[in-house]
Image (cartoon, grey):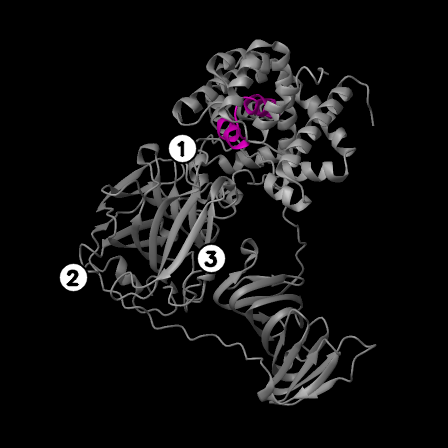
Amino acid sequence: MTGSAKTSEFLALFTRHQRRLYAYIRAQVRSPADADDILQEASTVLWRKFGEFQPGTDFGRWACRVARLEILTHYRHRRRLIPVFSHTLQETLADELADLVEGVDERSEALTGCLEHMSGPARQLIEWRYRADVPVAQMAQRLGRSQSAIYKALGRIHDLLLECVERRLAGNEVD
Amino acid sequence: MDAPDRYGELRKLIAALREGVLDEAGARRLNEMLAADPDARRLYAKYSMLQSCLELEYGTALAPAGPVPPKATRAGFGRLLASWREATGLIFQPARVALVAGLMAAAFLAGMGIVWWLPRSGEPVARPEVRQPGPTVARVVRTQDCVWADAADAPCYQSALEAGRQLRLSHGMIEIAYSSGARMIVAGPAEFVLESEKSARLVCGRIAADVPKEASGFAVRTQRVQVVDLGTEFGLSVDKDGASEVQVYRGRAGVRPLDARTSPKPLQLEVNQAARFSPKDGSLKPVPVESIQLRKPRFTPISPKPTKVEHDDGGLLEANQGHSGPIIADFSDGPGTAKPDQFVGTAGEGWLDGWQARSSKNIDTSHNVTRKTPLTPDGGSFLQVEHKAPARVPYNVHPYLWRRYGDTRDISLARPHTVSWRFRLDKCPGFRYDRGDAIRFFDYGADPALERRLEDDLITWHIQAHEPGEAFRLSDGYAYTGWVRTDVVMTIKHVYEFVVRVDPGNNQYRVAITDLTHQPGDPGKAAYESGNLRFCNSPEDPRKVGGTLVMGAMLGGARPERPQNALTWLIYSLDRVEIAPVGP
């Protein structure tokens, strides 16, 4: 394979599986910034090791395996950072998560449908939380509620969104 | 769906983790629950994927995500990017890696081969507004200490300005030559629109227009009044409420209200006559010239060239002789304590915007900038910068101060010029050298438009020092293909003068460093002069890669948890920042 063909193939595969990879890493770290760092490191390693990838096999699965090592490396090099999960649990979770995140694209599509039907304060809170990164204290101040009330509301909204996604995936709800 | 009562506690723990408020006990409990129950792990995974999807949904709603392709070869990078774009139709936006942040961050990230380009959730990523350029109607012929509200869209000396171009000048002065022959000086703060070669709209601010015969009929309007030239030189101001004043300096001008229903009759003003429009009652009245507040915008004469001691071998420092109009920031103006962009420096033309303090990764670092005096006995005020950060920030953050400069009458970025500054490291309490922290300067080739820099197969390098007691190094900031150790050791409280000579046409880049504290009696003798920095390529268009001065830090390691609310990383001082032409 020529260099440019190899590059094109890598890019095509990486693009197709990037959401899956992000979700896989994100489930094992505390913040989007940590996920970002690891993804960045993993993408470099993936490119470097792309020669080892067997064409025709599952790129996403292979990428998750590489990312798993990068997560371990990330925490090993930053000993002051506290991982979310114990080492044992991480071992257990790693394979299960790799299976589960295969469906992230379908989930994402279902979520888009759910968000389209969400309006009012719930939508406002989600927008603030994810688009504008508004701190909870500020949301509480804007809405004249306690921070505890905002945490509860956000929790409830996530529960509702997950229920909606599950219903859509089960085919019980369509637009 | 799992029964809510069975997993109520788990949901609460997951929510606490999601919102960043999960304590140690909660983390232990979460681990226990997930370790014991495969269904709990599935539920956790579903919530986690929901969160990922929300982050992706909002982070990428407006900009497709994708990695910048790996760097096969430096020469091939632009081509690769082009083919990648062509294949995908994607528009890359440096959003997750914050745009500017990139100045130093990018050098590091890009050096790794691939830059992840996914916008961060919570960062609204707006596509840049696509303005269909109209015909060119004017050109910038002079600038002085300009600070633009939109730095990315800032014009510079000799920039072409098209019809419909809206400009917001926060500070400084600009002179525009219309193709009709009219000239207009605008004093900031001002907001204005170039409508055609014979008209402009002043939203707020003040201008002076000099209109020769061939441009007769040149008109400037505000929201409520229009001033039409009748062979004249006039001044016009308008405030945010719409109150306007007009004065004729030469010839005649017509002033007419634009609201035909309520407005009084038009006025014709002769030389040294003035008028005032009041938005309260819609009145337009002649008033004595002495009673108006409008002052004709005038450029401040450029200060005399600073005295520089000639270098014995006719080297770098000699370059500044015999020219006027260097771009200078010596901080003798501006308030004592302010945001950095209020420190505009003095006298020089060519600054495209003010000092800006930023940090990478959207980390809310604070940057205290104070004007103090003096840094050296012969110097005036100087700028002291303190970079602070929250107790814990992620890996690889770069707080920095930067300012852009452009061409002037005397300086072309395409021709040889020098960039010099005086620097003193005051404190570095938060630095962790073992984690790769470093102080960096200059970053030649850094550009706020990171995307553009990558496309251009980047030419970048910087001066770097890791810790007191170590020598400054000159390093390829992108690919780490090489670095040069200087002989000058960075010592806290010593004042250093850096002179960088940039000659892109001849692919020559040299650096001289002088320790003014060690050599008080011989300030012109550089302690170190580099040879040509051969790890630099010569850019095809130096204007695209030069022109950004960056001072700041690269913090390589993750910050530990600390009890304090904020941590001072680094305090340093700057003075006599100067860009000057070289040679005849």
Of the two numbered discs 2 and 1 in the rendering, the one whose residue sits closer to the viewer: 1
Residue visible at 67% across and 73% down?
B198
Of the two numbered discs 3 and 2 in the rendering, the one whose residue sits closer to the viewer: 3
Query: Looking at the image, which residue sits at the far left?
Result: B521
Q: Residue B339: which disc?
A: 3
Badge 2 density bin: few <14, some 14–19, many ≥20, Cα 10 Å: few
Q: Which residue is mark 1?
A: B560
Q: Looking at numbered disc 3 in the image, what kind of residue is underneath it?
A: Lys
Residue B24 position (above or below residue B128): above
| Residue B94 place in picture, x, y as percent | 55, 40
Q: Which residue is mark 2?
A: B521
| Residue B332 place in picture, x, y as percent | 37, 67
Q: Nearer the viewer, residue B152 or A132?
A: A132
Residue visible at 64% across and 42% down?
A139
Q: Earlier in the sequence, mark 2 or mark 1?
A: 2
Q: Could you tell whether B258 is left or right of B243 in the image?
A: right
